[in-house]
Image: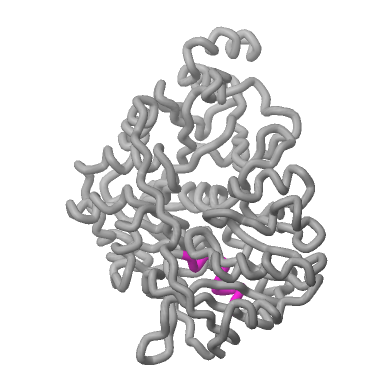
Amino acid sequence: MICSAQEAISHIQSHQAVFVHSVAAVPEHLVAEMVNQHARLKGVQIYQLHTEGEAPYAAPAYQDSFFVNAFFIGANVRKAINEGRGSYIPVFLSEVPRLFRQEVVKLDVALISVSPPDAHGYCSLGPSVDASRAAIEKAKIVIAQVNKHMPRTLGDANIHSSQINYMVPFDQPIHAHEPAPLSATDRQIGAHVANLVDNGATLQMGIGSIPNAVLANLMGHQDLGIHTEMFSDGVLPLVEKGVITGLLKKKHRGKIVATFVMGSQKVYDFIDNNPAVVMLDAQYVNDTAIIRQNPKVTAINSAIEIDLTGQVCADSIGQRMYSGVGGQMDFIRGASLSEGGKAIIALPSTTKQGISRICTTLKEGAGVVTTRAHVHYVVTEYGVAHLYGRNLRDRAKALIAIAHPDHQESLARAAGL
């Protein structure tokens, strides 16, 4: 069972389907050895969600050996996918585990990272359960990089060493990101969104400057809860100040629920052996029927662009794939159905090049991730547009009012207002 990476990876064969553990838990040592053995491999199908660090198998030099199938596109595989060395699989995050469990996608091998086994033989998947648990259940061969730097998280993250075919001891720090400084625009958006958050709300948010800006504005709130696909450093000050208690949640009362975590070493230390944090399977965490049971679910998501009817593109720039559907629709709908819930799309009014992200129509080929029927609130640095229950003309007026002032006149003219 315990062996070198070279021996373990030798069990991967041409044309097999290989899953790579997600986000900060990517087993880099195993991936590097798989690429090192590329000469004997042809047509290996890689399946992955977002992964941190490099994805060397996506390089042009290895296109005969590996093809990337991404459920979510990160920067490390974006070029490969848009150049044809891989492809995107459109799917809600909540359904990725089901694809494995129902063998719509049949996995031969799962490459994972785990903490060392405890006295009872249990390892932990650390900061990334997501669809990885399902991949382990269904893969014919499970190869694990055993890494002392992996935080030991609880919930569905625990797997027994008997579920692992080959264990490769190799210690290396997992990927960490320090929070980026907040811009003036981030702070303005964060303040507007925070004003929509009620005391006792259950929060879902992503990673990045806008979620961190929102969280930074919640210090005066009370009894907030967390049920989210992922969280990062922004929640830590709220936990320390007693703002996040989870005491009003109906599902996992008093617990922070997530399916993966990404951030600085500080957040990895926070989740390590912490019974207040429960890492669960994405099929459960992102299930609308589960989400809606919590009170005042407030889902805060972002977008690439939004048209004047409220259609949200969050996965592509025109025909060019950029990211993916992820869990946005899972939580937008779950929040909408929650008692007192709010579905929020927050984005800067313009791109870095000054192009309006509120537009008359989406770019040709752009994907509609969240439909116009699902959006409740849209927030930019210029304010809040409440779209729920409003007709198309009133929606256009509300969205134009929060567009960048330089673009408001042209948008109004294009809309016939």
| Residue beneath the point at 61% across and 22% down | 359
Q: Residue placed at 67% from the left, 24% from the top?
A: 361
Q: Is residue 262 left or right of residue 105?
A: left
Q: Is residue 304 left or right of residue 219?
A: right
Q: Residue pushed farthest left?
A: 241
Quadrant containing the C terminus in the rendered view: top right
Q: Is residue 310 above or below residue 300?
A: above
Image quadrant where residue 117 sits: bottom left
Q: Position of residue 197 (x, y in %)?
A: 33, 41
Where residue 362 appears, as percent x and y from the top left, is 67, 28
Q: Quadrant of residue 22?
A: bottom right
Pinpoint residue 313: horizontal percent, then vertical percent.
62, 36
In the foreground, 74 or 289? 74
Q: Position of residue 108 (x, y in %)?
A: 71, 77
Magenta-colored span: 128-136
Quadrant location, the N terminus? bottom right
Q: Quadrant of residue 314?
A: top right
Answer yes or no: is residue 173 visible: yes
Per the image, is 130 magenta?
Answer: yes
Q: Give above or below for 414 relative to 133.
A: above
